[in-house]
Amino acid sequence: MQVSDHSHLTYCTNIHPGENWSAHFAQLKQYVPAVKKEVAPDKAFGIGLRLSNTASLELSKEPALEEFKAWLKEQDCYVFTMNGFPYGGFHHTVVKDHVHTPDWTTSDRVFYTIRLFRLLASLLPEGMEGGISTAPLSYKLWHVRCESEKAAIMETTTLHVLQVVEQLVRIQRSGGPSMHLDIEPEPDGMMENTQEFLNWYLHYLLPLGIPFLEDKFRISAEEAATAIKTHVQLCYDVCHFALVYESAADVLKQLDQHGLKVGKLQISAALKAQLPAAPAEREAVINAFKEFNEPTYLHQVIARKEDGFLHYPDLPQALEDAANPAVKEWRSHFHVPVFVDSYGVLSSTRSDIENVLQLQRKQPFTQHLEVETYTWDVLPAELKLPMDRSVSRELRWVLQQLELPAM
């Protein structure tokens, strides 16, 4: 839904199962109208669509796409952003590091992403820009043998990203919408933080991309750089940046220094806790984290020490090192409900969301805002609601932070 002259708020439909289009469409029909009724009964409601590769192939067929467009019009809904990070199954299967598969070293990732953009171009309301978030090129722990291998991976993945950029330029030059690929840093991705995103952008994407676009479109280097900055932006996932202990103000300042943009703000919260020195108190915190140790998703932990940080690829590895006296704090990758601040002895990084939304309210830096909560089982029984009401509560909380009235 539109929340300012140019910005839109939604939630990501990766919360709804359905790896083929018919199953996912059934979930949209069940939940989206109910959420819209709660938060935007008298205005158009935007959808943050997540399509698996299988679903994207099926929706690309004309009858399915026309049926979906008709349903959107009937429900007074529209699609302005997509989540193109998970390619395959995201529900009822072990995801873990497979969420990066296939990565940007493969043509499969390129074809999938271009297909999503063609769908988005067909679905976008006239005059509205669109964006698709995607994986941070690859999973770093797959490529740890040597620096030369890492450099080769960065070059290969960048050239594949540029194939998508070429298509986005062609779409816009032919009268289609302006759309951007939003790279989403994540712990243990090839890009984990602002500095790694900037290093990639400045040392790989622009140096490789400028001559690439100059040749493809017979444009100047300046025009090529502008095209890249238009079509490749940052997906600022608040949970992920909180995990690496970065403040929103610092991230935005660094991007602004290089003329780079935030394509999408994913509103999400991680778990965190101080680790007390007292054994009994520390054990209580560790036991609380153990309750969250589930086998489906990666729950990377970044631990703060007085002299730096420790990275654990998943919660079990952190639990094995729980007695490490040097560690003062844990932050773990869980997309917990954004409106809850405390889970017993554990806390969430909700304050990071409050800070970034305050910045957005004062001086908007992105047009796309998307709540991405998918860890609902953590809620106490008294706070649990049916899914549509849970999502509506999240969106209403965000509206409050933006100092906007619920519809």
Image (cartoon, rainbow, N blue to C red):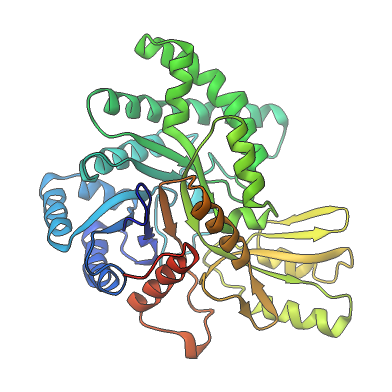
23 is higher (above) or lower (below) than 341: above
Residue at horizontal 62 percent and vertical 24 percent from the top: 203
Identified at 48% across, 51% down, the residue is: 265
Front-lying residue, 342 or 357: 357
Res. 193 in view: no
In percent of width and height, residue 111 lies at 34, 36
Disc tally is 0
In percent of width and height, residue 25 lies at 23, 62
Which picture quadrant has residue 399? bottom left
Where, by quadrant of the figure, is residue 32 drawn? Answer: bottom left
Compared to 119, does 78 lie above or below?
below
User: Could you tell me if residue 338 is visible in this image?
Assistant: yes
- Assign the N terminus to one quadrant of the image: bottom left
- As drawn, is 21 to the left or to the right of 98? left
At 55% from the left and 41% from the top, the residue drawn is 138
Placement of 147 over or under 64, stated as above or below:
above
| Image quadrant where one finds the C terminus | bottom left
Q: Residue furthest bottom?
A: 382
Residue 145, given in percent of the width and then of the height, sits at 71, 36
Q: Nearer the viewer, residue 100 or 377?
A: 377
List x then y, in percent, for residue 373.
47, 66
Residue at figure coordinates x 48%, y 55% from the top left: 266
